[in-house]
Image (tube, rainbow, N blue to C red):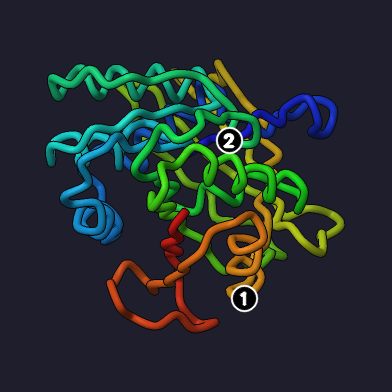
Amino acid sequence: MTGERKGADGPPGASSDYGPLCSLVYELDKPVGTSFGDVEFYRDLLAGTSGEILEPAVGTGRILIPLLQAGLRVRGFDSSPAMLTICRDNCAEHGLRPVLFEADMATFKEPAAFAAVVVPTGSFALVTGRERAVQTLRNFRESLLPGGRLLVDVEPLEQSTSPGPLRHWWFGGDLLTLSSLPPAQPEEDAVATWLRYERWRDGRLVETELQHFRLQRHDLDGFAALLREVGFTAVAVHADYQAGLPPTPDSQVWTFVATA
């Protein structure tokens, strides 16, 4: 889920990366086996791919593991060491040993190495700023074999203006909580949220993380234009994890399939 290390550029005292507590909450909230229709959709789109597949921002392996179980060859990377630790543990529990490594979406490139690059669950929005987005897409294209495909989710994003509900999970005897607050000043091209993760034990706070979570906004036509700008040719778009469903501004997610 994480693919760009930006903690050094965030507000003082906060990180925009996925730390250990944040990563644990992500795993508890969306464990391997969870699907929003995306797991089956990507597995079907990638069926028959004979070359190697790359999943940037691999997160905890929620998409990676079903793809490996379907017989596909997939490598994954993430900018968060904590996410990678959980991903390796999840893979080991399923008897899998894929190549996993730490890298940044905006800088990683391996020329002509992959038959497909897959960026599901809206993770591309973690790359903020037009220049970095363009560079990331260019790196993806150069990492693909001729005729290779980029599959990337983009979600229409709206800035929340009110605090989110307090959420909680149990981990052993510990209570984990997540509270969210909107920014004091909304941004034009990005959606931002302050996320506070807390770990409670016997009624006492034992660990906390503050995350400044920023996602880049993209519209339907603008993202298609970015893909063509960096050299992708054919660009198809599917809505809401249904192959062939035309996208609309009201869709919950757009999946772009672009050919190098």
Q: In the picture provided, is 214 more to the left or to the right than 87?
A: right
Q: Is residue 152 above or below residue 240?
A: above
Image position, residue 245 (x, y; %):
33, 80
Residue bearing mark 1: 221
Local crowd size for mark 2, using a 10 Å CA cut-off: few (<14), some (14–19), many (≥20) = many
Labelled disc at residue 125? none
Disc 1 marks which amino acid? Asp
Q: CA distance from mark 1 to mark 2?
A: 22 Å
Of residue 57 and residue 107, the one placed in the foreground of this image is 107
Q: Is residue 120 above or below residue 110?
A: below
Circles 1 and 2: CB distance less than 8 Å?
Answer: no
For residue 179, which quarter of the picture? Answer: top right
Of residue 204 and residue 172, the one placed in the foreground of this image is 172
Image position, residue 10 (x, y; %):
79, 33
Image position, residue 247 (x, y; %):
45, 80
Of residue 110 and residue 214, the one placed in the foreground of this image is 110
Residue bearing mark 2: 105
Q: Is residue 193 visible?
A: no
Q: Residue at left 25%, top 60%?
A: 41
Q: Is residue 222 visible?
A: yes
Q: Is residue 54 above or below residue 148?
A: above
Classify mark 2: helix, strand or loop: loop
Q: Residue at left 82%, top 64%?
A: 188
Image position, residue 28 (x, y; %):
34, 35
Classify mark 1: helix, strand or loop: helix
